[in-house]
């Protein structure tokens, strides 16, 4: 069996993709908690209440679910981003990130198709839901799915520094 090179195109894509996506998720969660565009920064409770109003504008969830989602999603995004950056159990977390972004894309496309003129809420307040948002989220979904597929393919490949199999 021929050993694979320690650095391949797939491994490079996997590394750069997970670092980019992880950083983006960390920033998205951070932006929902801190509201970097506002000065002085409001307390976290106020920021989460503002995020809850953005979630509610999608007209999908009952009030209790809106509050729970607003309180948990920023922290989940930060945790998921950190796990992607670290690269531990990448297949699990890349699959979870793909499912999360698929849900985001479905909701954004639905809202855009209904003609809702709302704030996206993706990276804090003030970002209108436009075709640009739909295309950006679709591209991020494609990237995340590519990372998940590469993570599964990489797990099947032999480690580049492992000894060749004996027959």
Image (cartoon, rainbow, N blue to C red):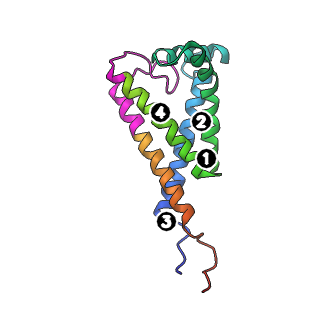
Q: Main secondary structure of the magenta part?
A: loop
Q: Nearer the viewer, mark 4 or mark 3?
A: 4
Q: Identify which residue is drawn at 60% across, 15% down.
A: 64
| Left or right of residue 78, residue 8 in this image | left
Q: Which mark is residue 103?
A: 4
User: Could you tell me residue 157's position as x and y percent?
Assistant: 54, 67
Residue annotated with mark 2: 26
Give the SS element for disc 3: loop
Which span of residues is magenta-colored?
Answer: 112-138
Image location (x, y in percent) of residue 46: 63, 13
Mark 2 → mark 3, Cα distance in angstroms: 27 Å
Looking at the image, the residue that sits furthest to the bottom is: 167
Is residue 116 among the parts visible in the rendering? yes
In this rendering, position of residue 144 left or right of residue 74: left
First along the sequence among labels 3 and 1: 3
Residue 26 vs residue 54: left or right? right
Q: Mark 4 near mark 3, Cβ–Cβ under 8 Å? A: no
Q: Which residue is mark 3?
A: 8
Which callout, 4 or 3, points at the residue further toward the start of the chain? 3
Horizontally, residue 100 falls left or right of residue 80, namely left
Q: Earlier in the sequence, mark 1 or mark 2?
A: 2
Residue 85 — which label?
1
Measured as percent of width and height from the top left, residue 61 is found at: 51, 18
Tell me how many marks there are.
Answer: 4
Instruction: Please tell me which of labels 2 and 4 falls first in the chain.
Output: 2
Q: Is residue 54 magenta?
A: no
Disc 2 is placed on an element classified as helix
Callout 1: few (<14), some (14-19), or many (20+) C-alpha neighbours within 10 Å? Answer: many
Q: CA distance from mark 3 to mark 1?
A: 19 Å
Q: Are marks 1 and 2 in contact (CB under 8 Å)?
A: yes
């Amino acid at each position: 069996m021929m050993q694979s090179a320690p650095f391949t195109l797939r491994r490079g894509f996997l590394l750069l993709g997970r670092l980019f996506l992880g950083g983006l998720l960390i920033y998205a969660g951070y932006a929902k908690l801190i509201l970097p565009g506002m000065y002085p920064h409001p307390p976290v409770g106020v920021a989460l209440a503002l995020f809850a109003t953005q979630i509610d504008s999608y007209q999908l969830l009952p009030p209790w679910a809106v509050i729970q989602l607003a309180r948990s999603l920023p922290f989940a995004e930060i945790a998921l981003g950190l796990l992607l950056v670290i690269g531990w159990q990448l297949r699990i977390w890349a699959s979870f990130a793909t499912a999360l972004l698929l849900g985001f894309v479905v909701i954004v496309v639905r809202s855009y198709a209904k003609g809702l003129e709302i704030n996206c809420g993706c990276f804090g307040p003030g970002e209108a839901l436009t075709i640009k948002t739909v295309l950006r989220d679709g591209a991020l979904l494609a990237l995340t799915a590519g990372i998940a597929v590469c993570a599964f393919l990489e797990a099947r490949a032999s480690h580049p520094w492992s000894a060749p199999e004996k027959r």
